[in-house]
Image (cartoon, rainbow, N blue to C red):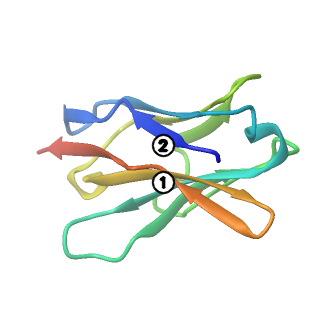
Amino acid sequence: QVRLVESGGGLVQAGGSLRLSCAASGNVFRFAVSAWYRQAPGKEREYVARILANGGTDYAESVKGRFTISRDRQNTVYLQMHNLTPEDTAVYYCAVTLGPNVVWGQGTQVTVSS
């Protein structure tokens, strides 16, 4: 069974940057759609970005131009975040779609102070 582990979250000042990582227990990202979602306190989980098996990417309007999703050749997907604002504060989750199944990580907290 595939397991995902996120890391890289933390506390950063507005305007700062962070890079989140999502490591899978197997080399699955080349064959799957991988995505980042986030959930702020009191809000629904929302889509942030995704990368397709062919390398194509897509972003939510709120993060376009500031966030970049990428993956390496092995088992890690990244989310590079620049120009962070307090509105980006949330728990960030990695997800991978494998056929009919979606596997989620446990999340990593990102807090942006003003």
Question: In screen coordinates, is 28 left or right of 77?
Answer: right
Q: In the figure, residue 42 lies in which quadrant?
A: bottom left
Badge count: 2
Can residue 22 be seen here? The reply is yes
Question: In screen coordinates, is 87 left or right of 56?
Answer: left
Mark on residue 21?
A: none
* Residue 68 at x, y percent in the picture: 58, 39
Q: Type of residue at label 2?
A: Arg
The answer to whether residue 87 is above or below residue 76 is below
Question: Which residue is drawn at the image coordinates 23% and 34% (left, top)?
Answer: 10
Mark on residue 66?
A: 2
Question: Which residue is drawn at the image coordinates 81% and 38% (left, top)?
Answer: 30
Mark on residue 63?
A: 1
- For the C terminus, the image quarter is top left
Instruction: Please say if the residues under marks 1 and 2 sit with CB atoms less than 8 Å apart.
Output: yes
Q: Residues within 10 Å of mark 1 (few under 14, many from 20)?
A: some
* Residue 62 at x, y percent in the picture: 46, 61
